[in-house]
């Protein structure tokens, strides 16, 4: 879930160097025999025999060495003499947290002040709120200075050079050109924040799930986002006629607190806390459903309604790919009335030519876009913005 390191399995001990207290335990020139492991780590622990797998496990706190003993017969009871005489070689070394690998492995405890995997609650079309920091970022209202005060200095800054929407912007009379938007990349937080190049306000945010077999895997930490959706409202919007996508706006029942979102000034953060009740110690309403980083696309559509025809990222340059609908039965009615098919985003770029994974699909709703991996249905990223 949190993608923290839980276990290191050294299945080829001769391919890696491991030293303990200045003494070699594993390595190309070191044979991890039973006697060597006992000398280096100490003969304090007698070990345990697994009769099903015919493996003797020499267990130490945080380290377990496994020795195959198929030809040594039953080692129950006084089998240590047979092991010392045979002196088998370890075939696996497990490095873990806790006293024994046979017990349920636990993650190392985090410091109470750690912000790793901090829950981020999403209010569609409004903004996000960080649970531990108890600070909010609101679209089109909070400035660059406020963003930096909430989540700190970014790991990287990327200025958008290609922006198809720049033609609709006003021209700067002094310099005769428009100012491009720029991204603040927070790899450790699993998010990218887009700042408006003209007004320098919070415009858009991308939350990454760091799913395997995606183009950005292991570049970002996983963002622990939580999107609360009112089920009654979602079903009503998805059944509306003439809409290519359902219009979703969560937490509309918090009218009193939502009105404070429009007020100016950073001091309004305290007044906005009512809009994010889900992380303030109060349980959400019974008709509220949760979309998180591990929610598959099928479940997302059950909550928000059909996503319509997607846009495609990373296809062949210059070609349009029209995915076939999952349901080929023409007799069934469908709510998908999207007038246009999918389009290729950046298909001709060098990044896509080197991408070993399949294309990803983008499904748009009001104020939110889901990037979905078609091979397994996992959501690889979520794009949030203010639709109106």
Image: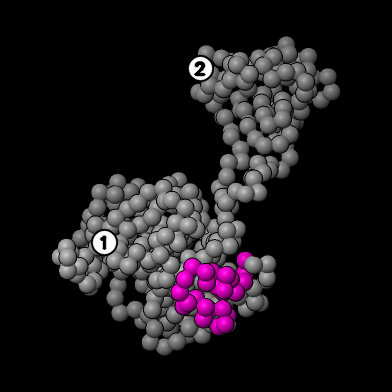
Q: Residue drawn at (40%, 65%), measured in percent from left and top?
A: 143
Residue 5 visible in the snapshot: yes
Of residues 219 and 371, the one drawn nearer to the viewer in this rendering: 219
Q: Residue furthest left?
A: 176
Foreground tag (1 vs 2): 1
Give above or below for 150 relative to 113: below
Q: Which residue is mark 2?
A: 28
Q: Earlier in the sequence, mark 1 or mark 2?
A: 2
Q: Is residue 330 visible?
A: no
Seen in the picture, residue 221 relative to 226 is either above or below; the reply is above
In depth, the one of 386 and 217 nearer the eye is: 386
Residue 198: x, y in percent? 29, 66
SS of the residue under disc 1: loop
Write down the quadrant of residue 256 in the picture. Answer: bottom right
Stretch of the chain drawn in magenta: 254-279
Q: Which residue is mark 1?
A: 180
Q: Position of residue 56 (x, y in %)?
A: 72, 26
Q: Is residue 334 above or below residue 201?
A: below
Left or right: 381 as drawn, with respect to 34: left
Main SS of the magenta segment?
Answer: helix
Q: Nearer the viewer, residue 254 or 284?
A: 254
What is the basis of the colouring in this image? one colour
Q: What's the mark number on residue 369?
A: none
Instruction: Assess whether residue 212 is covered by the magenta stretch.
Output: no
Q: Position of residue 264 (x, y in %)?
A: 45, 74
Q: Give the secondary structure at mark 2.
A: loop
Residue 308 x %, y %:
39, 74
Alpha-carbon distance for marks 1 and 2?
A: 54 Å
- The quarter of the displayed image where residue 322 is located: bottom left
Residue under the point 20% across and 67% down: 172
């Amino acid at each position: 879930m949190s993608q923290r390191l839980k276990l290191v399995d050294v299945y080829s001990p001769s391919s890696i160097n491991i030293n303990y207290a200045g003494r070699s335990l594993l390595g190309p020139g070191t044979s991890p025999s039973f006697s060597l492991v006992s000398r280096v780590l100490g003969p304090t622990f007698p070990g345990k025999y697994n009769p099903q797998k015919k493996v003797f496990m020499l267990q130490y706190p945080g380290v377990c060495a496994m020795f195959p003993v198929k030809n040594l017969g039953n080692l129950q009871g006084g089998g240590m003499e047979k092991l010392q005489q045979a002196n088998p070689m370890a075939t696996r070394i497990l490095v873990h947290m806790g006293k024994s690998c046979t017990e349920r492995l636990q993650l190392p405890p985090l410091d109470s002040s750690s912000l790793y995997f901090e829950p981020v609650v999403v209010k569609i079309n409004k903004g996000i709120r960080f649970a531990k920091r108890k600070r909010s970022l609101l679209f089109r209202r909070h400035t660059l200075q406020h963003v930096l005060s909430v989540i700190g200095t970014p790991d990287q800054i990327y200025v958008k050079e290609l922006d198809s929407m720049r033609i609709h912007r006003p021209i700067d009379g002094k310099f005769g050109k428009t100012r491009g938007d720029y991204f603040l990349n927070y790899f450790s937080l699993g998010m990218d924040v887009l700042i408006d190049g003209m007004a320098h306000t919070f415009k858009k945010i991308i939350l990454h799930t760091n799913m395997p077999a995606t183009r950005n895997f292991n570049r970002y930490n996983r963002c622990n986002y939580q999107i609360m959706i009112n089920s009654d409202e979602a079903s009503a919007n998805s059944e509306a006629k003439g809409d290519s996508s359902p219009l979703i706006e969560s937490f509309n029942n918090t009218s009193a607190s939502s009105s404070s979102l429009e007020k100016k000034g950073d001091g309004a953060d305290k007044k906005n806390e009512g809009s994010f009740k889900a992380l303030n110690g109060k349980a959400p309403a019974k008709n509220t459903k949760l979309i998180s980083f591990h929610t598959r696309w099928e479940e997302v559509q059950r909550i928000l309604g059909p996503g319509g025809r997607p846009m495609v990222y990373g296809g062949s340059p210059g070609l349009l790919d029209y995915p076939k609908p999952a349901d080929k039965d023409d007799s069934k009615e469908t709510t998908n009335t999207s007038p246009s098919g999918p389009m290729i985003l950046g298909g001709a770029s060098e990044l896509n030519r080197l991408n070993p994974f399949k294309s990803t699909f983008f499904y748009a709703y009001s104020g939110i876009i889901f990037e979905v991996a078609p091979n397994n249905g996992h959501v690889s990223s979520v794009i949030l913005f203010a639709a109106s």
